[in-house]
Amino acid sequence: MKSYLLGVTGGIASGKSSVCRLLSSYCQAPLVDVDQCCRRLLELNQSGWLALRSVLGDSFFLQSGELDRSALRDHIFSDADFRRQVDAILHPLAREAMRREVVLCQAPLILVEIPLLYEAGWQCDVDAVLVVYARRGAQCCRIMRRDGVERKKAIQAIASQMNLGEKAKRADFIIDNSGRWSTTREQVIALGIQLS
């Protein structure tokens, strides 16, 4: 059976995960989360951890040996060259992990949440792309509330990714999650009916 892979992407704090969980539940479709794949790769002595350690040395690692994710994330958001270096190390590993998980799913529809789908150039790995869109102001407020950071850091995080409007132009499907969740939910259910 050939599965239909729907890649779900968006911007930081656009609500990708919430949309994915609802759509997955509504369509009874398995969900592969690339962020989760990356978290596992970056656990102590796993392949992503080993690759970063060999390049970065002791920088961004705690005394316990674990990766200092917060320090690494801050540096990625503030230094574009460093971000490209880390992406070059981790993206191939994450892509392989994603593909392994997809093969295990065996379902007519599989959702694959890929935050940096366009930035990484993985759009050919899926059959269609859903972009979860949110206005910049909504993203900014959510990041500040969620991460407890000031506006400047929230704007920096948003700027580190491809413009969300540009992603939406390339998408096969768009869910606008700028406003109330009830409005987003209606859009997700409508898409679920279309995909079923």
Image: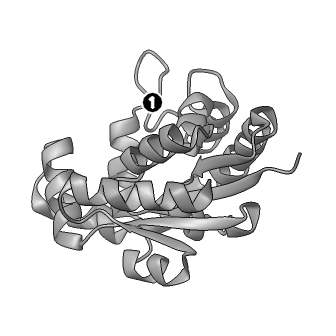
Residue 133: x and y in percent read 36, 68
Residue 139: x and y in percent read 23, 62
Name the amino acid, label 1. Phe
Residue at point 79%, 50% (across, down): 3
Task: From this view, report whether residue 64 is shown above or below residue 14.
Answer: above
Q: Left or right: where does residue 172 sit relative to residue 18?
A: right
Q: Which residue is mark 1?
A: 61
Q: Left or right: where does residue 154 sit relative to residue 81?
A: left
Task: From this view, report whether residue 187 is shown above or below residue 65.
Answer: below
Residue at point 56%, 62% (across, down): 194
Task: From this view, report whether residue 65 is shown above or below residue 70.
Answer: above
Disc 1 secondary structure class: loop
Residue nearest the observer in this picture, 104 or 196: 196
Q: Quadrant of residue 155?
A: bottom left
Q: Left or right: where does residue 163 sit relative to residue 194?
A: left
Q: Quadrant of the N terminus?
A: top right
The reply to whether residue 116 is in sight is no
Residue 93: x and y in percent read 71, 44
Extreme residue toward the top, this view? 64
The reply to whether residue 17 is in sight is yes
Residue 174: x and y in percent read 45, 71
Extreme residue toward the right, this view? 1
Residue at point 59%, 40% (across, down): 31
Residue at point 33%, 58% (across, down): 186
